[in-house]
Image (cartoon, rainbow, N blue to C red):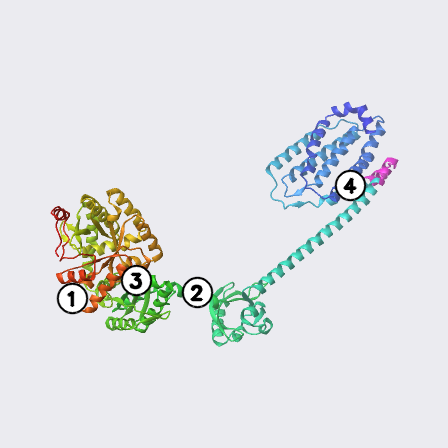
Amino acid sequence: MGARLRRRRAPECLNCPAAGPIISHMGVVSTAPALAARRSALARLRGLVDALLIVTSLVVLCWNLVVQPAQAADPLVSLARPVADVLLASVALIALGRCRRGSSAVGVLALTSAGALLVASADAIAYQRGADGPGWIPLGAALLIVLAGAYGARGPAGVPAGRLDIELLLPYGVVVLTLLAGLFWISSGGAPTAFGTWCRFLTILLIVAREGILLADNRRLARGLEDRVAARTAERQVREQRFRALVEQSSDSLAILEADSTVRFQSSSIERIFGYRAADLTGMRLIDTAGHRAGVVIAAKIGEVLGTAGATTTFEVTLRHADGVHRLAEMTITNLLGDPYVRGLVSNTRDISEATDLQDQLRHEAYHDALTGLANRALFREHLAAAMARGDVAILFLDLDGFKEINDSLGHAAGDALLVQVADRLRAAGPDLVARLGGDEFALITSTASAAGTAARILAELAVPFTVDGRGLHAGAGIGIATSADATDIEQLQRNADLAMYKSKDAGGGIVTAYHPSMHDALVQRVSLAGDLRAALLADQLVLHYQPTADLRTGEIVGFEALVRWHHPTRGMVSPADFIGLAESTGLIVPLGRWVLTEACRQAVAWGGAYKMAVNVSVRQFEAGDLAATVAAVLAETGMPPGKLVLEMTESVLLTDTDENLERIVALKSLGVLLAMDDFGTGYSSLAYLRRFPMDVLKIDRSFVERLGGDPSDVALVRTIIRLGARFGMRTVAEGIEDAEQLAILRDMGCDFGQGYFLSRPVAAADVTEMLVGSFRLAS
């Protein structure tokens, strides 16, 4: 019917003055539902029923008060305007019901809805009276809409979020308004119509449906609320169980105490930590169960926190375990008496005895030698600093004699066992502190008055043989003594003791040397000499002298031994005894040894290559690991025949790591050079080396040669060495022949070659050239 009426009177409706505002503002109001939050299906259905209820009520109201009076005056009047008015008013009321607290659109919707209602009401009144509508009403509506827009731009002044209660009451209010209007209309003589009756019937159905929907929605909300409450209750129970499990399984014991230390709650972890059952402690005063000493401490700490809410104190206290063992514990007491959920003192106690033991163990390991149990360098320095601060103090440094040879020949296990026994004997000497500084170096702290006596006792203790793996070993020591009288700090004191110790070592060991300031001067001179030696290698200050080696049967020269000499620009001729050892200790012996090897080979080639050239090889050169490559390079550089080069090495070279040294010796031997064992008989296990290493020459040490002609046992010893050489296919060379008697005895023994001042002193290269040109024969 509405469509038919719109076809008949559409132009009037569209051209009426109120039509423009109605249509334009319907678009504004229609945006209100979009501002509402997404709702459940029941809520959306209820909203639809509310909208139908409002529309139905407004239709009844408009039919009774507007349409029927208008049709009574003009039966052909168009229904487009009242329908539009009903729709506009319905949208305005629905939008008003959708307003939400805290929304920026609440003011816009409220004022716009009021304006739309005013427009719809004014147009309905005008329609009833048969007029096009007064002009001031649309103008007022437009002003209200403008005010709404300004208010919306300004925004509300902080209304709390949430839907307004009008949403639930608005449909009923519209129904009540329609009912009152109907009563007024009937009392004014109006007669009920079938259309109105059907509309009222529809309204009743909608109200019943709305109540049913509200009931279902309330049940849904109640179920949701119950589910949320159940979920939160379960979550709280899980949290409580988790917290209880954490408390019970914690490594700490948790208790809640009254102000007088009465235990109100005690976690069961106390049984695992201290052996007591929680039930036995609950209701007891902690200061009583902890024991007298611990109770006094705990009471004092409780007193510290009682006066301040939230105050905490942490302290260590010794508590008795249920097994009777006293253990160190860390206890933390927090004052939560004012906390409504606790109302007590919270005590957190943990057993820290194991951690303390571990800390003590780590501290001991950090300050003590793991092998001997003696103090290490760090602890020695701390004690020495404290002793110097007190005044008079002396320190003893000692280094074992021959320990390296024992360690290398018998193994590290035997060396370690020897060090442990040495440590025990040093403790027995009675110093204030004994420390192992590293390797076979030890240090002792004592008083100046007892330093000499302590050193004497140490030498006496070390003189007694040590038994390691059923074998008797001797390990003497060189001892250096320094006192605080000659030092200003511990660094200088240690340096002084070190200088004195090396003075004892240089003297052969087994003695005690007290520091003297002249030792420092000697050290300064030694450092200066080392710098000069380094410069001498670059400035050609070194020269070689050559000592002939003679065939003892014919007296002819068969070779030479290269001996280095140093012409210092200010010191003059420096003895090899003064700089060879220095070169060894500083590492300069390696470049020095290569220079000697190169110059000796070059000179041998210059003499025609008919004579053997012997060159000494030091331990440092041998341990460098590239000696074979160095020799090969020198042979190639100088053109020296390998069979004419003799490399001399002492038994000390062969003592260190025999497996590796055997490989190095085999590598040298593969070059074709000759190998000589120098100073034979002065080292350890000489026969073992004769069997193991492919040596070509044995050189009899001068200490044996110089005693020939005296004790018959010395003669027998030299004869034995010569026979051993012959047995192993080696030629023998006697060193240090000083007179004709020694020469005759060696000839009679069958010694092959000899060297010594009686035959010829070491001479310069130019003198050797004259000897060779003149067919010089050695003394015989």
Q: Is residue 119 left or right of residue 503?
A: right
Kind of residue at badge 4: Val
Distance, label 4 to label 1, CA atoms, is 142 Å
Which of labels 4 and 1 is toward the front?
1
* Frontmost residue, 746 versus 601: 746
Distance, label 2 to label 1, CA atoms, is 70 Å
Give the residue at mark 2. Answer: 359
Is residue 555 in view?
yes
Could you tell me residue 346's position as x and y percent? 54, 66
Give the residue at mark 1. Answer: 709
In the structure shown, which secondary structural element does the residue marked by tag 4 occupy? helix
Q: Considering the whole magenta stretch, tell me its main secondary structure.
A: helix
In the structure shown, which secondary structural element does the residue marked by tag 3 occupy? helix
Please name the residue shown 76% across and 33% down the image: 87
| Start-end of magenta stretch | 181-201
* Mark closest to the chain's N terminus, 1 or 3: 3
Kind of residue at badge 1: Gly
- The label on residue 49 is 4
Magenta-colored stretch includes residue 546: no
Is residue 488 in view?
no
* Mark closest to the chain's N terminus, 2 or 1: 2
Kind of residue at badge 3: Leu
Distance, label 1 to label 3, CA atoms, is 25 Å
Looking at the image, is 332 positioned above or below residue 197? below
